Amino acid sequence: AGSSPGDAELTRHQEQSATEDTAFISIQAFPALLDLPQDLEVSKVSCGSRHTAVVTRGGELYTWGWGKYGQLGHGDSASSDQPHRVEYLVAEGLQAEEVVCGPWTTYICVLEPGEAQ
């Protein structure tokens, strides 16, 4: 049973699609220092299977790592090796208080404007 030229074309197309959807994210086997924007003090940190999130003393949430399922909270499924602030919280006037990362999820507890800390 031989394969037809159409089968080879289909296989090449599938391999190309798989490559285009893959983003390279550096995986550190050992703890590494990370530079956050100046003047930020981290109060909480949590690690998922392939992503990390931190809450600052000012209530901002920064996330980075693998984002395929939207777990970074940036409104897309992009991945990033660098920490980025979750702008949705800023736009809504919400302050992050706690963060817990699951394998492919991120849970945060937020304070609404005017709530006591």
Image (spheres, grey):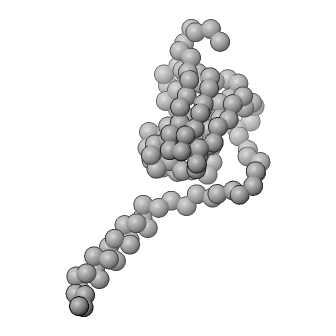
Instruction: In this rendered view, identify the residue nearer to me: 113 or 30.
Output: 30
Which residue in the rendered view is the most extreme toward the bottom? 2
User: Which quadrant, please, contains the N terminus?
Assistant: bottom left
- Is 102 above or below relative to 55? below
The quadrant of the rendering that contains the C terminus is top right
Residue at 64%, 37% (x, y): give it. Answer: 46
The residue depicted at 37 percent of the width and 66 percent of the height is: 17
Can the viewer see residue 72 in this picture? no
Q: How far from the left and from the top, in percent, is residue 96?
A: 59, 24
Q: In this view, does 37 lie to the left or right of 105?
A: right
Front residue (pair 12, 36): 12
Observer able to see residue 7:
yes
Q: Is residue 41 above or below residue 66?
A: above
Q: Is residue 34 left or right of residue 106?
A: right
Quarter holding residue 83:
top right
Q: Position of residue 88 (x, y in %)?
A: 49, 30
User: Looking at the image, which residue is at 70% across and 38% down?
Assistant: 37
- Taking 3 as reference, is 46 left or right? right
Residue 8 % position (x, y): 29, 83
